[in-house]
């Protein structure tokens, strides 16, 4: 399994109750997830930065840092902010859904935990996270390609005589056609005074001096 594949299907479990951590670890490993565990917030942040899991399962009622506060720290860290967080709460405690979503959680699961529920939610959110990551990479690659597509740079092989430019395939192009293909420039055509005199010597170029009127 490559490192990237391992990161995609990996879960960091954060819970200060060892038996709950072990239960989650067992059911996830049975489904071939790579599992990391932490019993409190500081350890969670260290493991998350090192392993970059595809998902964090986060218990709310922990000390000294509760789940809401820890999730806020995760979302404020540019290295970790994209990792989805699913909260775990007990039926005996009030889970503030609004607060949970406001601090960055994407879902929640209540205790007692059900294996099928945990696997289903973990799988869905990891897949969503992976697709979002791939989409962002594609957007960045497209933006980079677009920034270079119409940009002239580097050395251009130009003929010293006719001033044509040789392209990458070895064909010679006029400066006009080459620039139009490789930039967003457009041309309008006119003749400078020197070319006008050379090409059309019979035509008199009007003088800018006004003719004096005589009565």
Image: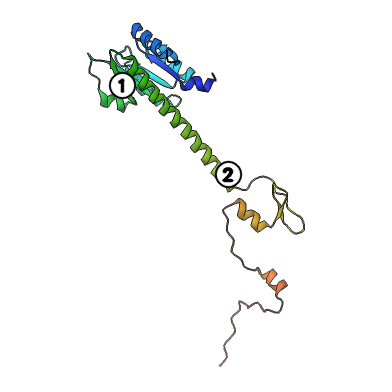
Q: Quadrant of the N terminus?
A: top right
Q: What mark, if any, has residue 108 been given in the picture?
A: 1
The one nearer the camera, 92 or 112, is 112
Left or right of 213 in this view: 45? left
Residue at 75%, 59% in the rendered image: 162
Q: Position of residue 69 (x, y in %)?
A: 33, 20
Residue at 73%, 49% in the rendered image: 170
Residue tagged 2? 148
Q: Position of residue 177 (x, y in %)?
A: 64, 57
Sequence order check, earlier mark of 1 and 2 = 1
The one nearer the camera, 71 or 11, is 11
Mark 1: secondary structure: strand
C-alpha distance separating marks 1 and 2: 44 Å
Left or right of 204 in this view: 119? left
Picture layout, residue 184 above or below residue 202:
above
Q: What mark, if any, has residue 17 been given in the picture?
A: none
Residue 161 seen in render: yes
Whether the residues at callouts 1 and 2 have beta carbons within 8 Å, the answer is: no
Please, which colouring scheme is shown? rainbow
Residue at 72%, 72% in the rendered image: 198
Residue 82 seen in render: no
Q: Position of residue 66 (x, y in %)?
A: 31, 16
Q: Position of residue 2 (x, y in %)?
A: 55, 20
């Amino acid at each position: 399994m490559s490192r990237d594949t391992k990161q995609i299907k990996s879960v960091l479990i954060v819970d200060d109750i060892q038996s709950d951590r072990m239960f989650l670890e067992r059911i996830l490993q049975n489904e071939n997830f790579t599992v990391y565990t932490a019993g409190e917030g500081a350890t969670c942040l260290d493991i998350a930065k090192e392993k970059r899991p595809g998902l964090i399962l986060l218990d709310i009622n922990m000390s000294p840092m509760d789940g809401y506060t820890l999730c806020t720290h995760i979302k404020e860290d540019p290295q970790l902010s994209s990792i989805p967080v699913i909260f775990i709460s007990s039926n005996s405690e009030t889970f503030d859904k609004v607060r949970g979503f406001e601090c960055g959680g994407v879902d929640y699961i209540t205790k007692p935990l059900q294996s099928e529920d945990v696997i289903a939610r973990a799988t869905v959110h990891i897949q969503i996270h992976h697709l979002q990551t791939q989409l962002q990479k594609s957007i960045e690659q497209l933006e980079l390609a677009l920034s270079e597509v119409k940009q002239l740079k580097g050395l251009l092989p130009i003929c010293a005589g006719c001033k044509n430019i040789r392209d990458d395939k070895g064909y010679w192009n006029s400066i006009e056609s080459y620039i139009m293909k490789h930039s967003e420039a457009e041309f309008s055509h006119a003749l400078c005074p020197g070319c006008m005199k050379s090409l059309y010597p019979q035509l008199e170029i009007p003088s800018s001096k006004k003719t004096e009127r005589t009565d």
